[in-house]
Every structure is written in structure tokens, then in C-alpha cells.
């Protein structure tokens, strides 16, 4: 069984920084692509940033230049460094990852979410 556990959320003032972590545990061969999504109250869950197995990245326009997604394959962990935070960045941040098992099969997993609140 595979689990994704997010951490690093919290309350921060506008202009501040947070670093989110998403640690995968269980029977894992490798993490293929991974991404961070954000869901504000009453809104849909939207993609914030994604990273491929090759390390290529993609960002939502609203976070370009402020957020950086990265990965540590040895630790099976994906990070989201968030700088210059704005109140509109507030929401629950979810980690998503396509994980390859030792049997060669890939499955899609979601974390439980971590709350980020940016005060003005």
C-alpha cells in the first residue's frame, strides 16, 4: 500500500514563504510524474505545479516566478517552495503522484491535503 503524506502548511503573512513536502511511503519502485493542486473554499481543485520523472516542470500562470516544485528521488519526496505568498494562494494543497510499483504497474495517488492560509 502506498501513502502520500503532505506537511509544511500553515499560516503566513503576505509576502512570506512556506515549503510543502509530500513524502511517499510503501511499496514503491519510483515516482513518475507528481504535482501539487490547490483548492480554495467553494472552488474546484486546480493544478499549481507539476514535475515529470525527467525533472521537467510546469506551473500555473498565477504562481510562475514565485513557486518552485522539486523532487528528491532518493527520499521519494516532492517539494513545493512557495515564496512571495499572496492571500489568493490560500487553500488546501494536495499532492498527487503517479507511482510505479516493483511489479511495473503505475497507480495514481493523492495525499490528504495541507492547509495554507495567507493573511493580508
Image (spheres, grey):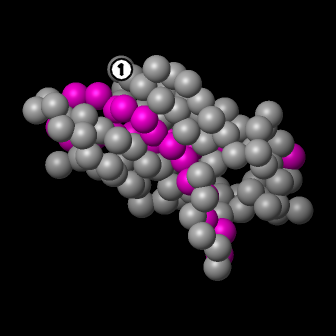
Asked if residue 66 lies left or right of residue 48, the reply is right
On the image, the x and y values in percent for residue 37 come to 56, 54
User: Which type of secondary structure does the marked residue at label 1 adopt?
Assistant: helix
Residue 24 location, quadrant: top left
Does the magenta run of residues contain 35? yes
How packed mark 1 is, by other alpha carbons closer than 10 Å (few <14, some 14-19, many 20 or more), is few
Residue that badge 1 annotates:
74
Examine the rendering and report whether any part of residue 43 can be seen. yes
On the image, the x and y values in percent for residue 111 come to 40, 55
The span shown in magenta is 15-41
Which residue does the image show at 46% across and 20% down from the upper left? 54
Residue 105 location, quadrant: top left
Residue 102 location, quadrant: top left
Majority secondary structure of magenta residues: strand
Up the image or down, 29 lies above or below 6; here it is above
Up the image or down, 90 lies above or below 68; here it is below
Quarter placement of the C terminus = bottom right
Residue toward you, 12 or 70: 70
Which residue does the image show at 67% across and 40% down from the upper left? 59
Which residue does the image show at 80% across and 34% down from the upper left? 65
Amino acid at each position: 500500500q502506498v501513502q502520500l503524506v503532505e506537511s509544511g502548511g500553515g499560516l503566513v503573512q503576505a509576502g512570506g514563504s512556506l515549503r510543502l513536502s509530500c513524502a511517499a511511503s510503501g511499496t514503491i519502485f519510483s515516482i513518475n510524474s507528481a504535482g501539487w493542486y490547490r483548492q480554495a473554499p467553494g472552488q474546484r481543485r486546480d493544478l499549481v505545479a507539476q514535475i515529470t520523472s525527467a525533472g521537467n516542470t510546469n506551473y500555473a500562470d498565477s504562481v510562475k516566478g514565485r513557486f518552485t516544485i522539486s523532487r528528491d528521488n532518493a527520499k521519494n519526496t516532492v517539494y513545493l517552495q512557495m515564496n512571495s505568498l499572496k492571500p489568493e494562494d490560500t487553500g488546501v494543497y494536495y499532492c498527487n503522484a503517479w507511482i510505479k510499483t516493483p511489479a511495473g504497474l503505475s497507480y495514481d495517488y493523492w495525499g490528504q491535503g495541507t492547509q495554507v492560509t495567507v493573511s493580508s
